Image: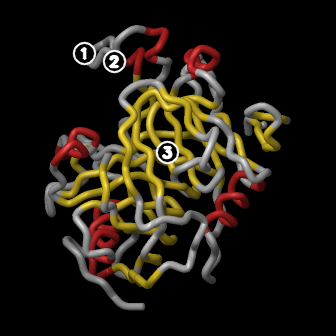
Amino acid sequence: MAAGGGLPARRGRPGGALTRGPGDAGHHRVEARRARDRHRAGRGPASVFLASPRRVGRRGGLPDLLGLGAIGRAYAECHEQIGELLAVAGGIATFPGDGARLPDYLLAEGTSPPQVVLASGLSCRGSFAKLVRFSTQSEADVVPLSELVSVCLDAVDGRLAGVVIAGETAGLTGARIRRSPAVGGPLRFDVPQVRDWLSFAPERTHTVTTSLIAGVVGRGAGGPIAGHLRPLSLVGRLSGHLHAAVFSYRALPQRTVELASLVRGLFRSHQLQDVIHLLWDDRGEAGVGESALVRGVAWVGPITDVG
């Protein structure tokens, strides 16, 4: 089909070293090296805060995006579909907030990107500095997301970084907005109204899947970015804003792979199952805890400019 005024696209609804971090990091093999992926040019990712509806992707390429948004050329034509959204390397995954029961996606096939309206969220543009591989060892069953985030930040010696993670999933903790804030009024977080707004499971979901996770993470981050990040762990002052596009299981390649190629393979050959905002449920024994992965790879770039 054509998107964005004749833009070719695919769209459809799915029918080296051991690095130790906090906790049991010694049980996980993590390799960090300089990334060779060049799917974006620039001196480093820069976060742009989009506090009001804005069209993205008409000129200059589609940056990595996450937040609440919809696929479309104008706010007026797609505001009813605003929901969780993630855009990475030309692949866009969203769960429309118009009562849809399945996620939607758009994969750019031409040289120009699709158009997206981001109602609220983050936009990152730049290049990656490190490639981090991770996997479990015999002493541990999973790699906690917060531990992986800590290693990614250490890899670039930064307090703030943009990350894209492709991982085989042990389980995800997250929530998804049920309906567009543009037509449903202000979000309500009191009980029982919150059940009409948010979908949240009382346990980890999406086991034995493959997830594409992207966002901004930090350690003791301050300034204007702080309001967009949420705690990821009790230790290390870790925080982040991360979304995940969940696909049917695919064993990730052991060899080095370019991000754009991996993203195209996921969208073309695997079923998109969900798009969620990742959370850390810190309610102790009553909480779900954090997301966890088994093995995979992460692209990391220090954020040097916040606008």
CA gap, disc 2 and disc 1: 6 Å
User: Is residue 283 positioned above or below 120 on the image?
Assistant: below
Q: Nearer the viewer, mark 2 or mark 3?
A: 3
Could you tell me the amino acid type at mark 3? Leu
The spot of residue 28 in percent (x, y) is 36, 79
The spot of residue 215 in percent (x, y) is 41, 52
Q: Residue at position x 53%, y 50% from top?
A: 63
Residue placed under numbered mark 1 in the picture: 190
Residue placed under numbered mark 2 in the picture: 194
User: Tell me, what colour scheme is on the image?
Assistant: secondary structure
CA gap, disc 1 and disc 3: 29 Å
User: Is residue 92 positioned above or below 139 on the image?
Assistant: above
User: Is residue 180 positioned above or below 44 on the image?
Assistant: above
Q: Is residue 20 left or right of residue 113?
A: left
Task: Tell me whether circle 2 and circle 3 mark residues in contact (CB < 8 Å).
Answer: no
Q: Residue at position x 65%, y 63% from top?
A: 260
Quadrant housing the N terminus: top right
Q: Residues within 10 Å of mark 3 (few under 14, many from 20)?
A: many
Task: Tell me whether circle 2 and circle 1 mark residues in contact (CB < 8 Å).
Answer: yes
User: Is residue 127 positioned above or below 33 on the image?
Assistant: above
Quadrant housing the C terminus: top left
SS of the residue at dot 2? helix
SS of the residue at dot 1? loop
Could you tell me the amino acid type at mark 2? Val
Q: Residue at position x 27%, y 68% from top?
A: 150
Any mark on residue 65, and which? 3
In the image as oriented, which residue stretches furthest toward the bottom? 16
Any mark on residue 100, and which? none
Q: Is residue 10 left or right of residue 23?
A: right
